[in-house]
Image (cartoon, coloured by chain):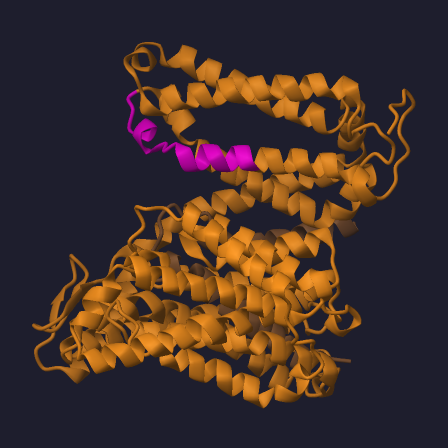
Chain colours: A orange, B brown
Amino acid sequence: MNATTEAPPIAPISGWRYRPQLALKALLLAEVLYLTISFDTQALEKAPSIWTVLIGWSPQYLRLAIAIAVVMLLPGRKWLTKVTPASGVGSDTPTRLPFLAFHAVAFLLFAWLTGIFFVGGASVVLHPALWSAAWCLTGAATLASWALAVYPHERWRAALIERRVLIAWSIAAGTTVWTAGLLTEALWPPLARYTFAIVRWVLSGLYADVISDPDALRVGTPAFRVIIAPECSGYEGVGLIVAFLAIYLFLFRKDLRFPAALLLLPLGAITIWILNAVRIIALVVIGTSGWPHIAAGGFHSQAGWLIFNAVGLGFVAIINLRGYFMVHAKAAREVADSLTFESTAAYLGPFVAMLAAAMITGAVSAGFDWLYALRIVAITAVMWNCRKTYARLDWTCSWGALAIGVATFAFWVATFPDASASKAVWPVALQSVQPSSAAVWLALRLVGYVIAVPVAEELAFRVYAVRRIMDSDIESVPVGAFSWPSFVISSALFGAFHGALWPQGVIAGMAFASALYRRRAVGDAVVAHATTNALIALYVFATGRWSVWS
Amino acid sequence: MNVAVYVLGVSIVMLSAASYAFAGTVAPEIDPSSIAGGLGLLAGGLLIARARWRSK
């Protein structure tokens, strides 16, 4: 590509020329992630100096910036595609390389200063203003050099002038959102008191010997008591459900009748707040009934998510089934495209059923999922119901897929952190029961891990998600079609379901997707995934490293 | 005018999400370690529901 001295023409993003900008944006994201993960600001917030306290608030500044950026980018994304230079300017022009080099130096300096500053050495305590100024300057230099490495300053200036109204609106709205998030924490304590009152009232009707301490917000029975902390008041569920419903209203605003549909927000909030009180009552009942480990373990962990999903999907079902709040009530009950629905249910259904089964069995467990087999039952039931749809897929497999599976296994084991012992509870739990029961559980776990889960996940991520990202009508995209966004996003989503091992999950997702792309046969992706899982299981049996089997 | 309306719409969505996303404390009511499963179930259920009931 050639550099040009003329003002570059404004044109949509296309092809490979956009990759340098993407790489630079990914670089900034990685730098921010590195800093936020590596350094903790809590120590600074307690420091005596106003300067260190101000710097200690940096996570809040990041949140403010994210709020403004989200508000700005959602309406302005089409504009952003237009300001990207169509010519070589903004990609690999030699004149911008110095900015990139300067950015690298500035970031290293900034990271070094952050390390010193956030640990809080003696020099920082003696000269907090000096260190704060240095930290701010290097941070500003890091950002400015990055911005100039992405686009020339003329383009930034033109963009700022052209979209000053949008920018002003976004700053105002983002600041309001950020401030609201801070202020609403003040609502937690009073909400906790109301939750406490409801729980105590219901428990008084169930048990004669209810113990309650209004000052400590402690309530329960002599056998099992809970403290309703302000964070446990139902506030988080309210925030989640209102956010979900607001996003739903916004995305499907053309189908919904306003202002009536806005009623869904308070209705959702009240419903989930009441159900949170029910959750706490159930917690006490389960604990009092002789299962305190289940109450404090799986139920406490999963019930909130189950309630949130039940309320969210329940509201969507009511809206669509009954036509309430919809512009055209009749249209709501019609099936738009049976083929799209069949495909969505067939490819996504097994994975969704697996998640639901895992959540439900997790809620009735005390740390070890004895009912794992229900996941296999759930996946099998959905797949049997949708079996005709799978006939359209190519289930053949090749030796290449097998090789990809072996390579992914080697990568997984090689990069698995030794410190992780999340599944070390397995041997202890299995030794606590009869050998025959342990053998049956292990056999079913193996079937699920090597057969059911790979099939469900490959259908969801490689057959559905990859195509859904490329087009809302998935049937218009052939299985195995490639695009960079769908490849990266679907693999990232796959990685997100692997918890702390998400980096390995992303790479594994890319490997399984590559298996699919080779011949466009879903059988290859499934075989690659199943091979990896089978080898991991064998490795665990051979070495006793149970933590690897996740 | 369109920009203003759009920004306001996005802001309302963000405002409702702010309570959760910007809260300084992780509440045990919603277990953060199950976030992928919880949100995955919701998103998957919603996609299937929308495919079933999408209006013409």
Answer yes or no: is residue B31 visible: no
Which image quarter is the N terminus of chain A in?
Answer: top right
Residue at image location 29% in from the left, 81% down from the top: A440
Is residue A528 something that shows in the picture? yes
**Place of residue A472 in the rendered image (x, y in percent of width and height, measured from the top left):** 73, 67
Kindly identify the residue that appears in the image at 44 percent across and 60 percent down.
B35
Question: Is A389 on the left-hand or right-hand side of A290?
Answer: right
Above or below for A299 versus A172:
below
Pinpoint residue A39: horizontal percent, then vertical percent: 39, 32
Q: Nearer the viewer, residue A481 or B17?
A: A481
Q: Residue at x 42, y 32 (%)?
A: A57
**Range shown magenta:** A30-48
Please say whether residue A36 is one of the residues in the magenta stretch.
yes
Q: Quadrant of residue A158?
A: top right
- Magenta stretch, main secondary structure, is helix
User: Which quarter of the figure has residue A193?
Assistant: bottom left
Task: State yes or no: residue A71 in magenta.
Answer: no
Observer-nearest of A97 and A211: A97
Q: Residue furthest front?
A: A399
Residue A442 vs residue A200, the one in the foreground: A442
In this picture, residue A100 sits left or right of residue A132: right
Counting every numbered tag in the picture gives 0
The residue depicted at 18 percent of the width and 83 percent of the height is A205
Residue A458 in picture, x, y percent from top left: 58, 68
Quarter of the figure with residue A548: bottom left
Quadrant for the C terminus of chain A in the image: bottom left
Q: Position of residue B16 (x, y in %)?
A: 52, 57
